[in-house]
Image (spheres, helix red, strand yellow):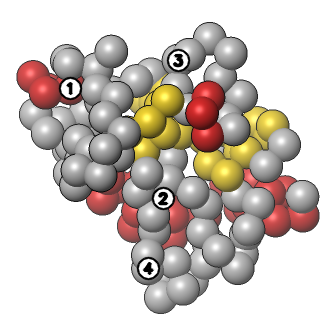
Amino acid sequence: MPGVEAFAQELRDLGFDVAQHGNFVIFDYPIDVGPLAGQRVNIGLDASGHPHSPPSGPFVSPRLLPTRPDASPAPLGAVHEAAGRGFPDAKGEWQYWSRPFTEWIQHGRSARAYIDVHLRRLFAQLPDDEALQCAA
């Protein structure tokens, strides 16, 4: 679990309050782009491969998008139940967005890169609020 601990420390160094659950780090994230700018969500990441490989796509709570596990493109496709992905979600409040961070190596393999490049891009690409209201 050294990779998880190192990633968690990088998040703490960025000012996030981080909880660790096995291979997962969980933190409160202030959305600053896209239709949800100004809101906060919880983000969970499997950081077990850090720094060699990026965290998985994010686990997000509350649920923002309709569950759609097909291979449709982002932002609406490939949205899964979190519990089916090994995430600790006993209450069913989380969803998993299958969104790999393909530029991990080019951006320095860090928590800062994951947040500044990948998470910000994901939230910037979300559809307008009406589509987000469909989340179940």
- Spatial distance from mark 1 to mark 2, Cα to Cα? 21 Å
What residue sits 28% from the left and 26% below the top? 66
The residue to which callout 2 is attached is: 115
The N terminus sits in image quarter: bottom right
Callout 3: SS: loop
Would you say the residues marked 2 and 3 are in contact, meaning their CB atoms lie under 8 Å apart? no
Would you say the residues marked 4 and 3 are in contact, meaning their CB atoms lie under 8 Å apart? no
Q: Tell me where residue 120 sits by quadrant.
A: bottom left
**How many numbered discs, if any?**
4
Q: Amino acid at mark 2?
A: Ile
What residue sits 25% from the left and 33% below the top? 36
Percent coordinates x, y for residue 35 in the rendering: 17, 36
Callout 4: SS: loop
The residue to which callout 3 is attached is: 93
Query: Which mark is on residue 132?
Result: 1
* Pointer 1 or 2: first along the chain: 2
Tell me if 131 is positioned left or right of 94 in this view: left
- Spatial distance from mark 2 to mark 4, Cα to Cα? 12 Å
Q: Tell me where residue 126 sits by quadrant.
A: top left
- Spatial distance from mark 1 to mark 4, Cα to Cα? 27 Å
Q: Amino acid at mark 4?
A: Glu
Q: Nearer the viewer, mark 2 or mark 3?
A: 3
Q: Amino acid at mark 3?
A: Glu
The C terminus sits in image quarter: top left
Would you say the residues marked 1 and 2 are in contact, meaning their CB atoms lie under 8 Å apart? no
The residue to which callout 4 is attached is: 103
* Pointer 2 or 3: first along the chain: 3
Q: Nearer the viewer, residue 1 or 68?
A: 68
* Pointer 1 or 4: first along the chain: 4
